[in-house]
């Protein structure tokens, strides 16, 4: 797993639960370190262990933690780059959804050795989408649910989201677009703002 992902988990835990909880999670795994380097790679089992440790220590369901992580990834000010990468997917929420197939490739343009889960979007009917996620980390689909909630709000769209695990661990996120123009979307400029 790319260090950026583990570093994002670290930031989420520290910002949400505090440094003491992060120290408990990492010490329970006996890693020998507590800080992840963003540009290194780590075994997938470490990421899986971090989530399992966090679930145990916080006594919160894994799906809730992963969905919160997804929300954090696109709403935390220090991770504005993730939101910007996603918003380049389209001028409205539907265009954004259709661009998700290409998200792993777009991410590699930013970080060449970053491997994201395989994503495949299918429009089943008008406004009804099915997003398939293939990941080496079980539950990654819940991260997508959290991200999609924030991004839908970003576009001003009202959506219903549901998650299901299918055969061979294939995760499915069902997206029903209720109203494309439910509210005023968040302002987005192509160029990043500088101070």
Image (tube, rainbow, N blue to C red):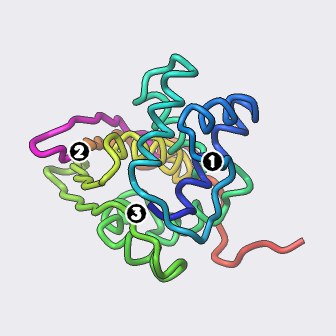
Which residue is drawn at the image coordinates 67% and 47% (left, top)?
A: 34
Q: Which mark is residue 171?
A: 2
Q: CA distance from mark 1 to mark 2?
A: 33 Å
Q: Which mark is residue 96?
A: 3
- 119 up-or-down from 68: above or below: below
- Image check: 137 left or right of 39? left
The boundaries of the magenta stretch are 157-171
N-terminal-most mark, 3 or 2 = 3
Which residue is at the front of the view, 69 or 101? 69
Q: Residues within 10 Å of mark 2 (few under 14, many from 20)?
A: many
- Inter-mark Cα distance, 3 to 2: 19 Å
Q: Residue furthest top?
A: 59
Residue indicated by mark 1: 32
Is 127 situated above or below 5? above
Image point (84%, 74%), residue name: 194
Q: Is residue 34 above or below residue 165?
A: below
- 57 or 194, which lies in front? 57
Would residue 155 be counted in the magenta stretch? no
- From the top left corner, tell me how far across and down residue 88 is, in percent: 51, 72
In the rendering, at what x and y percent does residue 189 appear?
Answer: 66, 71
Q: Residue at x 57, y 21 (%)?
A: 58
Q: Calculate the distance from the C-alpha at mark 1 to the C-alpha at mark 3.
A: 41 Å
In the picture, measured across the screen, residue 120 lies left or right of residue 192, that is left
First in sequence, mark 1 or 2: give its number: 1
């Amino acid at each position: 797993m790319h260090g950026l992902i583990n570093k994002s988990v670290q930031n989420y835990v520290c910002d949400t639960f505090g440094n003491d909880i992060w120290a408990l999670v990492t010490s329970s795994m006996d890693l020998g370190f507590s800080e992840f380097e963003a540009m290194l790679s780590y075994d997938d089992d470490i990421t899986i262990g971090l989530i399992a440790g966090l679930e145990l220590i916080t006594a919160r369901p894994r799906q809730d933690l992963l969905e919160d992580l997804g929300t954090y990834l696109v709403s935390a000010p220090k991770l504005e780059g993730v939101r910007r990468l996603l918003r380049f997917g389209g001028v409205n929420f539907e265009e954004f959804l259709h661009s998700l197939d290409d998200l792993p490739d777009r991410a590699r343009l930013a970080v060449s050795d970053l491997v994201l889960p395989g994503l495949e979007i299918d429009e089943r009917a008008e406004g009804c989408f099915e997003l398939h996620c293939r990941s080496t980390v079980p539950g990654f689909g819940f991260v997508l649910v959290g991200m999609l909630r924030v991004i839908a709000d970003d576009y001003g769209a009202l959506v219903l989201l549901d998650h299901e695990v299918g055969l061979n661990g294939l995760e499915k996120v069902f997206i029903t677009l209720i109203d494309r123009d439910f509210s005023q979307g968040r302002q987005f400029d192509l160029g990043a703002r500088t101070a």
